[in-house]
């Protein structure tokens, strides 16, 4: 092949694998218009820290959503207004029965957030206890339901040019010029109650975020970077700038209906009728893999967090009015015990490639394993029922593998679970992604009570994101395109 032809071929290959100008994609670089944080918790003495960075030279209007773990109902929503190159941090803390949030950061929020843990703003039960517009969903109605879940950040628009709003939120000597004017803009008769698009331009991306789950008393911290969706909005198109407590925009509010993903075989660009299916396509997996370490000699403890960032739009009676929708198997309801169960197949191997029989302890042997919630925890070789490491109340399984250390995999999809709904609706070209939309991580902790011969207790912790396999099929049996 001539050198020039080789160059043309290489360029063509790069073009084929590069994201489409109209397609959303999970940005491996960590920035985008939407951020998904798989887990927050205040159980077991933990606080959860959430950070957001605006890497652009323009201001941002951002919706912050904290979603409880049973069914993904909103427990705290507020608007955050970031100045150019701004950085914001908030802390989720326990209350007597639930959770609350505060921030020592000066960036403008509506409502204005308290600045101390003692005065933190409590999470609400209104969106699942029957007092809010969504009504009850069949799950628990108490405040304890707010104590763990996941976080969703949606860019509503960019603030550029010499607008009054950009001037108000821009810092001078570390303090925004006039956060009170931003708060009053959403008060009765305020400018945004009349025209919410005023001073708000098209979303431009450039948001990134991190989270820490911190137990100060025991010296334990788990930290991770948020998943970032780029090109959530069609380039140049407007987002939705809404009142702080509005249920939209959310992760279903994309204006792009195209998802760019990668399988083992090839990059795919898939178009869907509904934008939520395009978002789900980004997170689809038919196989989730990670490790576990539970060696008794180091008091090893391993738990997995598995979050379905779009599940509520397929199983929640508020969104799935008539019936559950694929890729999920059951509607969230009281009839189903406040769960929406999806069966999975599990396997494990030790460090010498042996694959033991896996069973669930603390009761009769379990032959059917599954995931019940929007956010849940799986334990491994636990000495007692429940969640020893993260103190989760949303445990979808405690697995005994008969070995202390190894790796574990969860198989999802119609090919792993016969008769299930676990595949996404077909894309416009006929490609069908198999499995379910999932994200999460493995959290690992261990202790050393004898440091350099001294009886000094040292705790260690680590976190590793899951490895995902993307499965694709076609009704006609041809390769996905």
Image (cartoon, rainbow, N blue to C red):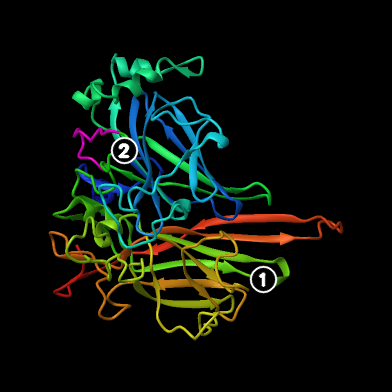
Q: Which of 312 and 276 is in front in this view?
A: 312
The circle drawn on residue 295 is 1
- Residue that badge 2 annotates: 245
Q: Which of 334 and 201 is in front in this view?
A: 334
Q: Is residue 14 above or below residue 429?
A: above
CA neighbours of label 2 inside 10 A, class few (<14), some (14 to 19), many (20+): some
- Which stretch did the figure color magenta? 232-243
Q: What element carries label 1?
A: loop
Q: Is residue 74 left or right of residue 479?
A: right
Residue 368 found in image quarter? bottom left
At which x and y percent is residue 105? 50, 28
Residue 416 found in image quarter? bottom left
| Residue ID at (59%, 81%) | 402
Q: Is residue 39 visible?
A: no
| Main secondary-structure element of the magenta-colored stretch | loop
Q: What element carries label 2?
A: loop
Q: In this view, does 212 lie to the left or right of 264?
A: right
At which x and y percent is residue 465? 48, 57
Q: Nearer the viewer, residue 416 or 363?
A: 363
Q: Quadrant of the N terminus?
A: bottom left
Q: Nearer the N terminus, badge 1 or badge 2?
A: 2
**C-beta proximity under 8 Å, tags 1 and 2:** no
| Residue ID at (32%, 34%) | 244
Q: Is residue 73 above or below residue 284?
A: above
Marks 1 and 2 sit apart, C-alpha to C-alpha, by 46 Å
Nearest to the eye among marks 1 and 2: give it.
2
Q: Which of 115 and 82 is in front in this view?
A: 115
**Does the magenta run of residues contain 241?**
yes
């Amino acid at each position: 092949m001539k050198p020039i032809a080789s160059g043309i071929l290489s360029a063509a290959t790069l073009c084929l694998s590069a994201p489409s100008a109209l397609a959303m994609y999970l940005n491996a670089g960590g920035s985008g218009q939407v951020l998904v944080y798989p887990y927050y918790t205040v159980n077991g003495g933990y606080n959860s820290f959430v950070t957001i960075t605006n890497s652009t030279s323009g201001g941002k209007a951002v919706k912050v959503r904290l979603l409880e773990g049973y069914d993904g109902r909103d427990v705290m929503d507020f608007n955050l207004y970031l100045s150019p190159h701004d950085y914001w941090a908030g802390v989720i803390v326990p209350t007597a029965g639930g959770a609350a949030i505060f921030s020592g950061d000066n960036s403008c929020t509506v409502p204005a957030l308290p600045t101390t843990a003692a005065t933190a703003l409590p999470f609400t039960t209104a969106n699942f206890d029957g007092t809010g517009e969504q009504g009850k969903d069949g799950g628990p109605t108490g405040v304890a339901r707010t104590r763990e879940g996941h976080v969703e950040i949606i860019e509503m628009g960019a603030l550029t040019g010499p607008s009054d709003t950009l001037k108000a939120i821009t810092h001078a000597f570390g303090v925004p010029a006039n956060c009170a004017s931003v708060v009053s803009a959403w008060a009765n008769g305020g400018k945004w109650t009349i025209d919410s698009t005023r001073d708000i331009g098209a979303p431009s991306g450039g948001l990134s975020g991190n989270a820490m789950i911190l137990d100060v008393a025991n010296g334990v911290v788990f930290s991770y970077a948020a998943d970032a969706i780029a090109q959530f909005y069609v380039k140049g198109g407007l987002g939705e700038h809404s009142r702080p407590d509005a249920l939209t925009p959310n992760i279903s509010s994309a204006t792009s209906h195209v998802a760019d993903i990668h399988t083992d075989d090839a990059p795919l660009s898939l178009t869907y009728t509904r934008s939520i299916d395009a978002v789900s396509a980004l997170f689809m997996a038919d196989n989730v893999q990670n490790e576990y370490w539970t060696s008794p000699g180091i008091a090893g403890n391993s738990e997995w967090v598995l979050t379905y960032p779009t599940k509520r739009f397929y199983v929640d009676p508020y969104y799935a009015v008539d019936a559950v929708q694929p890729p999920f198997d059951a509607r969230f309801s009281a009839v189903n015990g406040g769960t929406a169960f999806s069966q999975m197949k599990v396997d494990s191997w030790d460090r010498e490639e042996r694959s033991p029989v896996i069973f669930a302890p603390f009761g009769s042997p379990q032959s059917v394993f599954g995931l019940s919630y929007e956010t849940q925890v799986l334990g491994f070789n636990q000495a007692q029922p429940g969640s020893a490491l993260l103190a989760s109340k949303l445990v979808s399984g405690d697995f005994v593998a008969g070995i202390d250390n190894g790796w574990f995999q969860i198989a999802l999809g119609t090919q792993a679970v016969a008769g299930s709904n676990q595949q996404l609706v077909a894309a416009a070209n006929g490609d069908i992604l198999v499995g379910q939309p999932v994200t999460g991580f493995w959290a690992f902790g261990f202790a050393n009570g004898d440091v350099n011969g001294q009886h000094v207790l040292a705790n260690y912790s680590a976190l590793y994101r899951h490895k995902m396999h993307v499965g694709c099929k076609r009704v006609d049996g041809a390769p996905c395109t």
